[in-house]
Amino acid sequence: MLMRTDPFRDLDRLTQQMFGTSARPAAMPMDAWREGEDFYVELDLPGIDPESLDLDIERNVITVKASRPQLDPDRSMIAAERTRGVFSRQLFLGENLDTDAIRADYRDGVLRLVIPVAEKAKPRKIEVTHHNGEHQAINA
């Protein structure tokens, strides 16, 4: 049987929502990896209205914000464990990424960012001129 009110449990739940726990952090859980010439970042945001998503970038820092509305105060809740309010996370990107070409897609509760490697960071060939006038390419 579920207990309707327990002030200690309510205080514990509130503390976990504000500061998170190792099992359920307050920040958005994230996976990140590189595949070819793109970096991928996936953030779990189940139940978020896509209209509440806000992505900003300033000086290689992406800020992701989303919100889940507060519960109806007239509702007599038996359990309310999902965090409500505004969520925010910042991602610090390296200089070798093309921040002008970031793509974002929200599907099935997952926000996916695709961040391409900048042209200046990709491997390229440098042409070397010999003293006899012949040209030879060397991989950089």
Image: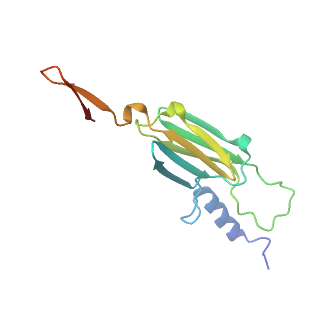
Give the quarter of the image for residue 118. Answer: top left
Query: Residue 28 at x, y = what percent?
Result: 59, 53
Q: Is residue 71 above or below residue 138?
A: below
For residue 65, side relative to residue 132 (left or right): right
Q: Residue furthest top?
A: 133
For residue 135, side relative to residue 34 (left or right): left
As rendered, which of 95 and 129 lies closer to the eye?
129
Query: Residue 139 at x, y = what percent?
Result: 27, 36
Q: Residue furthest left?
A: 131
For residue 88, side relative to residue 7 (left or right): left
Instruction: Tell me how many marks there are.
Output: 0
> Can you say which quadrant of the picture contains the C terminus?
top left
Q: Residue furthest right?
A: 74
Q: Is residue 56 above or below residue 33?
A: above
Q: Is residue 10 above or below residue 107?
A: below
Query: Residue 22 at x, y = what percent?
Result: 53, 65
Colour approach in the figure: rainbow
As rendered, which of 8 and 115 lies closer to the eye?
115
Q: Residue furthest bottom?
A: 1
> Can you say which quadrant of the picture contains the N terminus?
bottom right
Give the quarter of the image for residue 132. Answer: top left
Q: Which residue is found at the position 50% from the left and 44% from the top?
A: 91
Give the quarter of the image for residue 80. Answer: bottom right
Q: Which residue is found at the position 80% from the left and 68% from the top?
A: 78
As rendered, which of 14 and 68 lies closer to the eye?
68
Q: Which residue is found at the position 38% from the left and 31% from the top?
A: 120
